Image (cartoon, rainbow, N blue to C red):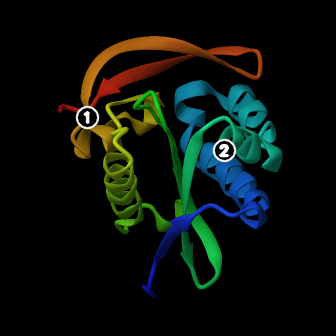
Amino acid sequence: MTQLIIRPMQESDCEAMAKLHARAVLAAYPAAYGDEVTRDWAQSRRPERYLKARKGGEQFLVVEQDKQIIGFGSWGFSNGELSSMYIDPDYHGQGVGRRLFDDIMKNSRNEAAPVTWVKAALPARGFYEKMGFVFREFGTSTVQGHVIQDVLLEYPA
């Protein structure tokens, strides 16, 4: 594997992020949520969403390899939430998610706003538990008009 670069999101990354986000959802979520929900979720990803979230205080890091975005993650600057983490399905199991997670945690601690919780899609639960999060409860979210089950996990202090 060539060198990974983890860096802050730039406006020019947003189109690639939206495509990666959709691709990751389509690869990981059908078994948990069904084809219709997954398709609607994937089709809702728009580049401007990331810029709007950043203006609202969300922090973003992207993972780049060979000038291609292969992952990204975000966290709330003031509320301790790990808001998102998506890795290109072709890179699952290669440590990319772990590297991104470690950088997000380091950055959030350096900003005096450490990540303490995540509300995740069901297929992501195992990854977050491997990273040290602890299950708290099941819940629901609405995605493109569909109510889906999700999971709340907390990161021990």
**Disc number at residue 54?**
2
- Give the residue type that dot 2 points to: Arg
x, y (%) of residue 37?
70, 26
x, y (%) of residue 55?
70, 41
**Disc number at residue 86?**
none
Query: Which numbered disc, 2 or 1, marks the residue that appears first in the sequence?
Result: 2
Front one among 70 and 27? 70
Quadrant location, the C terminus: top left
x, y (%) of residue 92?
44, 61
| Side of 53 where 81 appears, left or right | left
Q: Name the residue under label 1.
A: 133
Residue displayed at 75% across by 36% down: 39
Residue displayed at 75% across by 27% down: 36
**Element at badge 1?**
loop
- Give the residue type that dot 1 points to: Phe
Front one among 13 and 68? 13
Are there few (<14), some (14-19), or many (20+) residues within 10 Å of tag 2?
some
Are there few (<14), some (14-19), or many (20+) residues within 10 Å of tag 1?
some
